[in-house]
Amino acid sequence: MASSTVRPEHEDRPEEHDVARRLLASAAMLAYDPATEVDWETPLDKDFHGTSPEWSTLYGTAYWREMTDAQRKELTRHEAASVASTGIWFEMILQQMILRDVYAKDPAGADVQWALTEIAEECRHSIMFARGARKLDAPAYRPRRLAMELGRAFKTVAFGEAAYAAILVAEEVLDVMQRDWMRDERVVPFVRTINNIHVVEESRHMKFARAETRRHLSRAGWLRRRIHALVIAIASYVIVTSMVNKDVYANAGLDGERALAEAKANEHHKAMMRSSCSGLMDFLASARLLTKPALVFYKRAHLI
């Protein structure tokens, strides 16, 4: 009687594993330990900004022109801390979605080993962001309650392209900002180091998210693609609008109500967001995820 051979699961998806193997090799060659790479000991120098000033939500407004240089720097430090805190929130969501995705897969597969490597990097990033926010003398900024509950639901039910495309949106939006901040000598040095570490390691995560989004979409029918396009857009809207907490203005010593109103109407910041997301929108368009209902939320978030 002829015997049959059962092929291991990881042999059935060669292209997927080629990507994972390349990313594992990259992680082995270039990875950072924030505990030793970041200067945590030098006291905060308040002569520096927390972000590039042009990325401040008030840059270009009447209020910005009235602010002193010290106030501008204080505001950007609080904004940087808020973005870091939002990053921690979404990285926790990301880790749970990835773990759920690989839960029943062959642990010998390169894709599972890469997923665990990515989770390890995200854990280090979250600790790094938390320490960075504290060093910026900022409180623990958290997303509003509705966003927290939506995130709780999303991480529980999102799967396939909905999970990976949402991961990609969060990573790409933050990546564009941080590439500017890490090169800007006006930004406090330890924050520049944090941004550099995150940009280098997140470039691997974005490659994997793009590959997984395309792979899952290759099996998606018309209805599933339409539903997930809207889910991804809503998740993107919640993530992007949660990046800068409304409390940063009062905590920076400003008139909170006036600052929030001017930030919401700030055309400069909206233009920065749109220009920075052009590559991301091109990818979503190529994946046929920019449906008319989805575009409503991307436009409201000023991503397109």
Image (cartoon, rainbow, N blue to C red):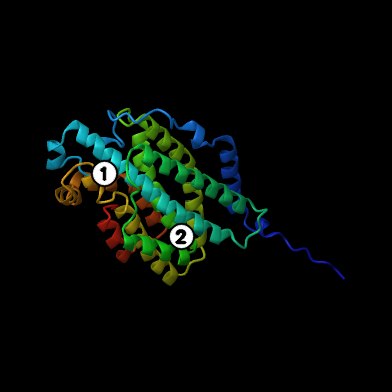
Q: CA distance from mark 1 to mark 2?
A: 26 Å
Q: Taking 240 as reference, is 164 left or right?
A: right
| Relative side of 159 to 173, left or right | right
- Mark before the other along the chain sequence, 1 or 2: 2
Q: Residue at x 63, y 60 (%)?
A: 105
Residue lying at 42% horizontally and 63% vertically, measured from the top left:
152
Residue 141 coordinates in the image, percent (x, y): 33, 49
Dot 1: within a 10 Å radius of its alpha carbon, few (fewer than 14), some, or many (20 or more) residues? some
Q: Nearer the viewer, residue 120 or 269?
A: 120
Res 136 quadrant in image: top left
The kind of residue on which mark 2 rests is Ala
Badge 2 element:
helix
Give the labeled residue for mark 1: 272
Q: Tag 2: Cα neighbours inside 10 Å, few (<14), some, or many (≥20)? A: many
Residue 299 image offset from top left, x and y in percent = 26, 57
Label placed on residue 300: none
- The foreground one among 61 and 36 is 36
Foreground residue among 47 and 282: 47
- Mark 2, residue position: 163
Q: Position of residue 62 (x, y in %)?
A: 12, 41
